[in-house]
Image (cartoon, rainbow, N blue to C red):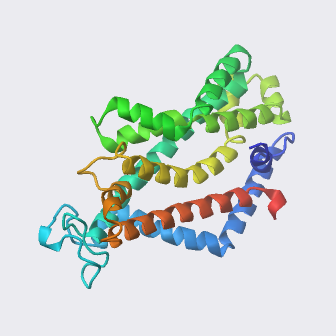
Amino acid sequence: MTDLIQATSPAPEAGAGPRRRSRSLTGEAMAQLGRSPLVWIALAILVVLAAMAIAPGLFTKVDPQRCILLNSRKPPAYGSWFGFDIQGCDVFARTVHGARASLSVALLATIGSTLIGGVLGLVAGFKGGAIDAVISRVTDVVLGLPTLLGAIVILATLGSSGNGVLRLALVLSVLGWATEARLMRASVLQTREADYVHAARAAGASSIRIALRHVLPNSVAPLLVLATLSLGGYVGTEATLSYLGLGLQPPVVSWGTAISDAQPYLASAPHMLLFPSLVLTVTVLALVLLGEAVRRAFDPRSR
């Protein structure tokens, strides 16, 4: 985590130097990302997945809820590329439509945990003192709780009431912000001692102006890198919780629920499990590759 902060935080220079350096690092990072074939492959995969989530009708006209028992467990064939599940639903249609729920949970959880952790980390690092101590202790407590175990306990307690996507994203955000807060705090502690911050204080700028205009823009890069890496993790967590019957529930279609429904029929109808699992694996792999590429691009020592 310290390496990530050092790699993505601009050097403390006087005057307008940090802004020029920050832009320079950003430009170099974007140029390196543009030269990486893996980045373009990952982006191409993610663009297709995003299109599946936003406009599934572009990929299939079949209703994922339309099930014909006569087609139960039929293998892949022309017109039904992934075969049919136990209820006679088209597996390809359910896989395509499942992208929306699975990716929505991951995106909302990433945004939520990044906002919560970013705000708390900024306040703790900038204010210091008792506020920093309280936030740091709460962060330590949340970090000590395994995300998956905590989600299982909370979701089992809440039951299946309410919107499944929002409920699951909220639970993951509440459990996942601590790493972001600790990373943001460390970055702010480094940035607030820069010469341009002291110059702003000497010029009479308010604390809020200094925090939002000078400290935040020069401290947020490590947080954005971590958010990119977190997306893949949340996709996998959603699938795991839905597989256990605690995440998204029918009639919501997601990759996790498809895998859960297919597991008992692995021997007799392996296609039911194979294709949703393959799409899930490719999605997580693409997100991890993109996140790792972003981390390396913002690390000058990797060039």
**Residue lying farthest to the front in this orientation:** 267
Please name whichever residue, 28 or 274, is drawn nearer the observer in this view of the structure.
274
Q: Position of residue 76 (x, y in %)?
A: 29, 79
Q: Is residue 88 above or below residue 152?
A: below
Task: Decide which of 181, 73 is in the foreground and name it.
Answer: 73
Residue 216 at x, y = what percent?
67, 37
Answer left or right for 250 relative to 44: left
Quadrant in the rendering for residue 302 = bottom right
| Quadrant holding the N terminus | top right
Q: Is residue 280 visible?
A: yes
Q: Residue 185, image x and y in percent?
A: 70, 32
Q: Is residue 76 placed above or below 262 in the rendered structure? A: below
Question: Of all residues shown, which one is farthest toward the top?
Answer: 130
- The residue sitting at 19% across, 68% down in the picture is 88
Left or right for 198, reference 66: right
Q: Nearer the viewer, residue 44 or 140?
A: 140
Q: Is residue 149 above or below residue 35?
A: above
Q: Residue at x 37, y 44 (%)?
A: 247
- Going 34% across and 72% down the picture, which residue do you hit? 271
Residue 142 percent coordinates (x, y): 58, 29
Taking 101 as reference, is 204 left or right? right
In the displayed structure, 117 sits above or below 288; it is above
Label total for image: 0
Q: Is residue 206 visible?
A: no
- Furthest residue in direction bottom, as rendered: 78
**Quadrant including the C terminus:** bottom right
